[in-house]
Image (cartoon, rainbow, N blue to C red):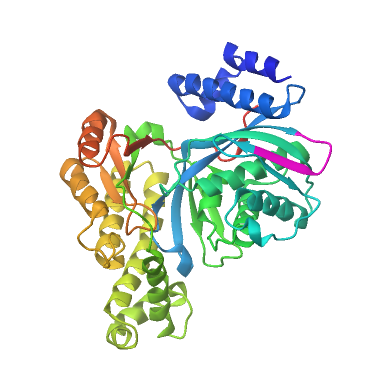
Amino acid sequence: MTNQLKAKILSGEFDSRLKEVYLNDSAVEEQKSREAEILDSFTETFGANNDVHFFSAPGRTEVGGNHTDHNHGKVLAAAVNLDTVAAAAKRDDTRAIEKSKGHKCVDIDISDLSVHEDEYGRSDGLIRGMCAGFKERGYNIGGFNAASMTKVLSGSGLSSSAAYEVLIGTILNHLYNDGKVSDVEIAKISQYAENKYFNKPCGLMDQMASSVGGFITIDFNDPSKPIIEKINYDFASSSHALCIVDTGGSHADLTDDYASVRSEMENAASVFGKSVLRDVDENEFNQNIALVREKANDRAVLRALHFFNENKRVDKEVAALNSGNFEEFKKLVIESGFSSYMYNQNVYTTKDPQNQGVSLALAMCENMLRGKGAWRVHGGGFAGTIQAFVPVDMLDEFRNNIEAVYSEGSCHVLSIRPFGGIKLF
């Protein structure tokens, strides 16, 4: 019964579990109120007579490997403490009904797992795609009721869609498969759902970081069989906060900018008869830069140089975290940011050089954090967000200065979450 579960949550029966996931007492209290609100929504939508369980899937942040994955490179990513949470229960039919806060109910019949083009870009397409992916891989599926609420910021580069996909996969995993489907498999199914049923040709990094949790590195040398390694670094011990700054720039009309990064890297690779830069010998490339300039262009050369160095930098960042050397890690983050700025050139669009919100935020970070923290462009770039690692003793000053230039609430203070997609209780 949902009322009984709500009473247990508010009385503190699950506090130890919540603290394990959300890391501190204030977050636990906030989460209890949030789950009570979710349960109220569930009861209002579906009634009180349900065997309800709670599930959670986090957003993610890219930490290293900026624009490397599409050329079969390496990335470093991490789950963050902003998540999407759902209360869910089995149904005895083939309907999957999901009610997200602020949105209408999604209600689909999962006896039909064909692609519906009218569901492209919609959450019902993701639910149908996740169910199809589970069934194609021989796993069980079934109907469910779910009420959800998200804190993963849309458009912030934290991948709200991946969190949603992993959440649905986690629900199916625990309601119908006794939790036996691996985190990696859920991530792959999530990518499948987004590619085929949502019609977005995403890579695997977002889903993998959300599903596995903590810091992870992924090697996409063979995209069909990516090599995933979880890094056991306790970010809480670093005495730093992870800040994502929303500079307010629009991603509208940037499709060509994003596409040009990949296409120019691939054009550089084609000079050597390869389709991606990962397959090009770096020494051979360096000996033939004049030829690449002639066959492609100067920016393609610079972006290729970024790829080669960024790929090696991911390995160095992983080694620094594995050895607990956070100071070295910060130096590498800064190197990554300067490489994106100077060589990959994805910090502002040449279509509108007068507006450089990301560039300005990076300049402010350098002024405030030089010798103390680290900063870089976040995600695809050209507009949107930056990432900064800020010492906790200067967090208030950093946030106040940033928000004085951008807007109140533009600096989002996050932490690295040690868990991926999970059943809370």
Query: Does residue 420 appear to the left or right of 331 in the view shown?
Result: right
Q: In the picture provided, is 95 more to the left or to the right than 401?
A: right
Residue at 63% of width from left, 36% of height from top?
A: 99
Q: Nearer the viewer, residue 380 or 148?
A: 148
Residue 21 in percent (x, y) is at 53, 29
State the image coordinates of residue 420 (x, y, percent, origin top left): 56, 40
Q: Nearer the viewer, residue 57 or 358?
A: 358
Residue furthest right as drawn: 92
Q: Quarter of the image containing the N terminus?
A: top right
Residue 19 in sight in this render? yes
Query: Looking at the image, which residue sits at the far left?
Result: 367
Q: Count all numbered tags in the image, as a single digit.
A: 0
Residue 291, quarter of picture: bottom left
Q: Is residue 92 magenta?
A: yes
Q: Which residues are magenta?
A: 90-98
The residue that appears at 43% across and 83% down in the rendered structure is 270
Q: Is residue 51 above or below residue 164?
A: above
Instruction: Residue at 28% x, 43% y: name it.
Output: 327
Residue 286 is one of the magenta-drawn residues: no
Would you place residue 256 above or below residue 367 in this image? Answer: below
Q: Which quadrant of the structure image shows residue 245?
A: top left
Q: Residue visible at 34% across and 88% down?
A: 295
For residue 400, side relative to residue 336 (left or right) = left
Q: Is residue 178 visible?
A: no
Q: Where in the figure is residue 401, as x and y percent of width and height?
A: 20, 36
Estimate the x, y position of residue 171 in percent, counting from the top left: 68, 39
Quadrant of the image containing the C terminus: top right
Pick whichever, 412 or 374, lies toward us.
412
